Image: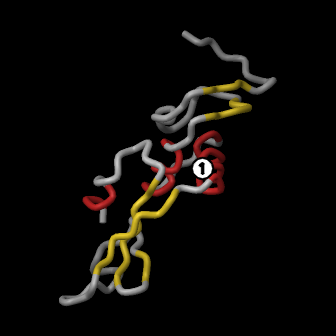
């Protein structure tokens, strides 16, 4: 699943879902744990990254929480961030970032 996800570059407006039959594979579980068997049908589906997905990823990143690979793709598709209170986040700023606005309580050196 990780190999398939790497086919979608960070910053793309789409994410990749991998399905075993009708079930979406979990990135954090092995194929065996998810019951993948010989002759199972695996389907790759490109899905648009929505604003809701971007907002959810931004909330987690800006609170310093770890994110999943899918959330990482949503994070890097963001082009505007507002009310940022800290530069201490667990991953680089989004690849597509065009505008960044700091919040009222931002008080950190830019160096």
Task: Where is residue 80? Give x, y as percent.
Answer: 63, 34
Decide which of 1, 60 is in the foreground and name it: 1
Against 24, residue 6 (above or below) is above
Task: Where is residue 44? Give x, y as percent.
Answer: 33, 70
Q: Quadrant of the C terminus?
A: top right
- Please identify the quarter of the rendering in which residue 5 is found: bottom left
Disc 1 packing (10 Å; few <14; some 14–19; many ≥20): some
Against 76, residue 36 (above or below) is below
The extreme right residue here reads: 104
Seen in the image, is 88 located left or right of residue 76?
Answer: right
Determine the residue positioned at 47% across, 33% down.
Answer: 92
Element marked by disc 1:
helix
Task: Where is residue 73? Give x, y as percent.
Answer: 46, 50
Decide which of 46, 23 is in the foreground and name it: 46
Picture mark count: 1
Seen in the image, is 101 located left or right of residue 18?
Answer: right
Task: Where is residue 6? Give x, y as percent.
Answer: 30, 53
Against 30, residue 11 (above or below) is above
Determine the residue positioned at 40% across, 44% down.
Answer: 10
Determine the residue positioned at 29% across, 54% down.
Answer: 7
Q: Quadrant of the N terminus?
A: bottom left
Seen in the image, is 13 located left or right of residue 45?
Answer: right
Which residue carries the number 1 mark?
Answer: 54
């Amino acid at each position: 699943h990780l190999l398939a996800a790497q086919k979608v570059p960070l910053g793309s407006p789409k994410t990749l879902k991998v399905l075993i039959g009708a079930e979406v594979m979990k990135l954090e579980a092995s194929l065996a744990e998810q019951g993948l068997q010989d002759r199972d049908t695996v389907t790759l589906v490109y899905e648009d990254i929505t604003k809701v997905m971007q907002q959810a990823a931004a909330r987690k990143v800006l609170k310093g929480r770890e994110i999943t690979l899918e959330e990482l793709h949503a994070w890097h598709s963001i082009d505007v961030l507002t009310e940022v209170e800290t530069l201490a986040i667990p991953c680089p700023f989004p690849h597509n970032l065009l505008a960044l606005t700091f919040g009222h309580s931002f008080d950190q050196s830019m160096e």
